[in-house]
Image (cartoon, rainbow, N blue to C red):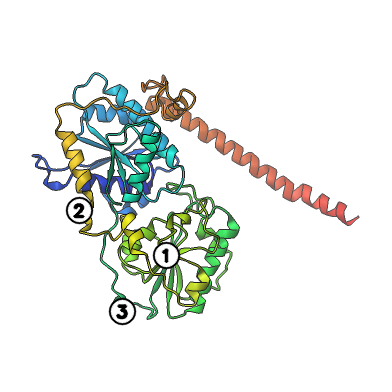
Amino acid sequence: MLADSDTRWKWGALTAHRLVPDESGSASGRRLDGFLLRGRATPTARQLTEVGVRADAMREVTGVEFVRAVDRERYDVIVLSLVGGAVQAMLHGLRHAWQDDERRPVVVTGYVGVVYEKLADGLLLRHGADVVLANSRHDADRFRDVYTGVGADGNSVVECALPFLGGDRYDPKARLARKYPGGTVVFAVQPSVPDNRADRTYLLRRAVEHARRHPDREVVVKLRSKPGEHTTHIEELPYQKLIAKFGDDLPANFRLAYGNMGEVLDTADLLVTVSSTAALESLHRSIPTAVLTDLGVRETLGNHHFLGSGALASWDQLDAGHLPEPNAEWLSRQGVAADGPYETWFDAARDRVAELAAAPTLPPLAPFYTPTTAPGYLPGRLARYGFEPDGSPRPGASAEDEAQVSALRRVVRNTMREAARGAYRHGVQRVAPVIRRMGEL
């Protein structure tokens, strides 16, 4: 399994476990080898530990190294849990590596959560995998429409559910045993939504004010990463730094927290977020869930995905004691709290993978994007991960060459950073006083 961030590692590893259960019948049992794609979002050891999903082996690789490794090892199933461009690069790289092979692994990919932007772009970059997983009936219908709309094969789309749903159903009586009798409110923040200081500070201030208004409740801000760590999205304005502006005058019933989302939800009586996938986890467990409308219902925020869910609410409404009531039909279409046992939602995907894995031969991987269909787009996508337009490794794409390039980039980046700091200090210490004096004349 190949992943490029902590969230995608979580989705990919859990998906692999559900697609190939322990009772697979092999002599050695199921084995999960984990590969982390080297890049800006490569998860740290702390992030992997927090996710809580372990592999039998783990290594960090470049795209070319991954293709060479899986070509040598001969796996049965490969799960690509990556951003769309990386999936496309791996598909072309694997196609080239296996071009003379009669037998190859089954390749599976999908999305880690809510698909609320770049639907066509992301889907067409994932086309070519044997199985493209859709996390709900709603997504499966949309995915097939995109593929058939461009004349591509949509049979690879298989409906399932998010692999990290589950956990115990919410018991309102559990609140009585909490430290705070009014229960625990969890605000699940996101790395890139909203994307500006004013909005993020506003949301943080409202969470603090909610704690002050309700001293009988505990308000927990669930953080995604520590400053300096990256996730699926870049977090340029960490809440840990924004909260420092509030000083020491914070209520005793307010705190920041890290940790596995499932464990955090075990203690939640209300989940609040802008548009995090955590809302789906919470709704699946019947925990009262609020998707905030304070900053509007907008595509850029992603909360438009929850139209019709019944979960939309504002901090003002929550302050007044409102608890949103979810819409059962919407939940069902989203693969949340669906009819029947949750585990059965993976049966179709498990059967499809088993059928393909048992086939004597599989056709070559056939992505929609080729040098013929997308000559102005595909080469750049592949080059970014070390591949030529035909999927072969680019000259100089070895680990040693890439290490040298990375080292050079670090030197240049550090030099530029020091130059910027020097310019800033000169501006503050020399230029600004002169301008102030001139203004006083």
- Element assignment for label 2: helix
**Mark 3 or mark 2, earlier in chain:** 3
Disc 1 crowd rating (10 Å Cα; few below 14, some 14-19, many 20+) is many
Q: Which residue in the protein does label 2 denote?
A: 344
Q: Residues within 10 Å of mark 2 (few under 14, many from 20)?
A: few
Instruction: Identify residue type, mark 3.
Output: Ala
Which label sits in the foreground, 1 or 3? 1
Instruction: Answer whether labels 1 and 3 touch (C-beta < 8 Å).
Output: no
State the CA–CA distance, disc 1 to disc 3: 26 Å
- As displayed, is residue 10 above or below residue 199? above
Mark yes or no: residue 38 visible.
no
- What is the C-alpha distance between the residues marked 1 and 2? 26 Å
Q: Is mark 3 on a helix, strand or loop?
A: helix
Mark 3 surroundings within 10 Å by alpha-carbon count, few (fewer than 14), some (14 through 19), many (20 or more): few
Q: Which residue sits at x=41%, y=65%?
A: 310
Q: Read off the residue under disc 3.
A: 177
Q: Quadrant of residue 120?
A: top left
Quadrant where the N terminus is found in the figure: top left
Depth check: give the residue in front, 333 or 165. 333
Type of amino acid under label 1: Ala
Marks 3 and 2, how far apart at CA? 33 Å
What is the secondary structure assignment of the residue under circle 1?
loop
x, y percentage for residue 52? 29, 54
* Quarter placement of the C terminus: bottom right
**Residue 311 numbered tag:** 1
Whole-percent x and y of residue 11? Answer: 31, 48
Q: Is residue 99 above or below residue 423?
A: above
